[in-house]
Amino acid sequence: MDGLTMAILIAAAVFAVLALILLIGSIRMRAEMKAFRDQINEIRTTDREQPIKVASFGASTVRLAQEINRLIADLRRQASHSAEEERRVRTIMAGVSHDFRTPLTAADGYLQMSEEILARQDLTEQDLTELRDYLKIVSERVRYLHQLSDEFFEVTYLDARKELPLEAVRFDTVLSEVLLSQYDRMQDRKIDMRIEVPEEQMLIRADRHYLERILENLFSNAEKYAKSFLEIRVERAGTAGSGKNGVSGGALGPKIRLVMRNDIDENLRIDPAQMYEPFYRAEGRTGPGTGLGLYICKELADVMHFELRGDIQNGVFETEVVMPAIKEVTDETADHRR
């Protein structure tokens, strides 16, 4: 056998080996892709939670499996979040539907009785007294419906603005305005207000409207539940280790800490774990209320990156709000936010 023939045979053998290697690789790749497809289909159609596995240890195959597993994990998180949002919306809608129906039914009944009185020929003083009482009740129900619609609008509006631009806001100014607006109502209930607020500018990063709503809802909650006193304390908190139990500092950076404490009736039973849930009402409480106030506070606080906590110890209801402060206060910014 001459040299040329030998070279041709060797070349043919090499090509045959290469072809066999490529064929085996192709078969393995097809098998791997089929295994991927079958596993993805199983994940899609069943409750399988195991990640995709690979039969070979090729770098490209392993990286592909890793990326697919990351994608599946992201999709699962999104699906879980969507399911939770749907559950929350259903809960709110059910509660709003119930809370609208009850006062509407009552108002309709009292209006019918008012019409019956007005249809009488000769109205007596007793008739007029009953009519005034009925109209007063209707007015109270209408005010309650107005409050409920405002709070429901707040919830839906908040859902549409999960991300919003925050700006420098004078917390001391907003707090003073809300305190003045709530003071007479507290006095009417003979609530002893004890206020400790530094006489200085306190600038925080927030949305002014949302901040006002949080404070108004917290004061409204205190007005409903306070038995004899309401303490309001504002202080600056440092980075780590400041404030109550060393947690008020939270993330790095200066903070403004608001603490509100009030005693509650011994007959009230409040579950701290549920107080921020929509439509939660304390057991033993009488009187109107939507049960959305603290829930809205928590949602607004989360959007603005505030920390909101509540607890009950020895018959005292305490709420703590920790807000990100702005270190420097320029004259221009302070004047703009007065």
Image: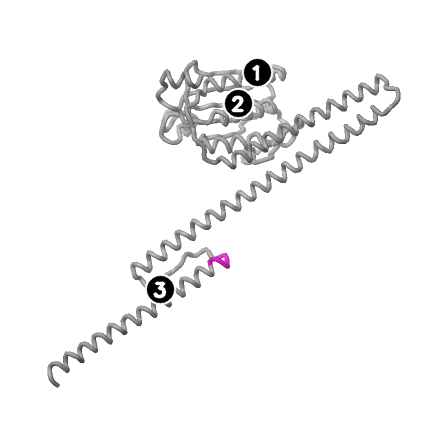
Label 1 residue SS:
helix
Q: Which residue is most to the top?
A: 199
Q: Position of residue 58 (x, y in %)?
A: 30, 61
**Image: 105 above or below 66:** above
**Contact flag, marks 2 and 1 (Cβ < 8 Å):** no
Quarter of the image with the N terminus in it: bottom left
Query: Which residues lie in the magenta part?
Result: 43-47
Residue 156 falls in image quadrant:
top right
Label 3 residue SS:
loop
CA separation in Å, label 2 and label 1: 16 Å
Front in this rendered view, residue 146 or 267: 146
Residue located 50% across and 27% down the image: 210
**Image: 229 above or below 308:** above
Q: Counting other residues with Cα less than 10 Å from the Cα at mark 2, is it few (<14), some (14-19), or many (20 or more)?
A: many
Q: Position of residue 155 (x, y in %)?
A: 55, 34
Answer with mark 3 or mark 1, whichever residue precedes in sequence.
3
Q: Counting other residues with Cα less than 10 Å from the Cα at mark 1, is it few (<14), some (14-19), or many (20 or more)?
A: few
Front in this rendered view, residue 233 or 149: 149
**Contact flag, marks 2 and 3 (Cβ < 8 Å):** no
In this rendering, the label closer to the viewer, 2 or 3: 3
Secondary structure mainly formed by the magenta segment:
helix
To which residue does mark 2 refer?
261
To which residue does mark 3 refer?
55
Answer with mark 2 or mark 1, whichever residue precedes in sequence.
1
The three-letter code of the residue at mark 2 reads Arg
To which residue does mark 1 refer?
183
- Verify whether residue 199 appears in magenta: no
Quarter of the image with the C terminus in it: top left
Q: Position of residue 131 (x, y in %)?
A: 79, 22
226 vs 322, left or right, is right
The three-letter code of the residue at mark 3 reads Ala
Front in this rendered view, residue 35 or 234: 35
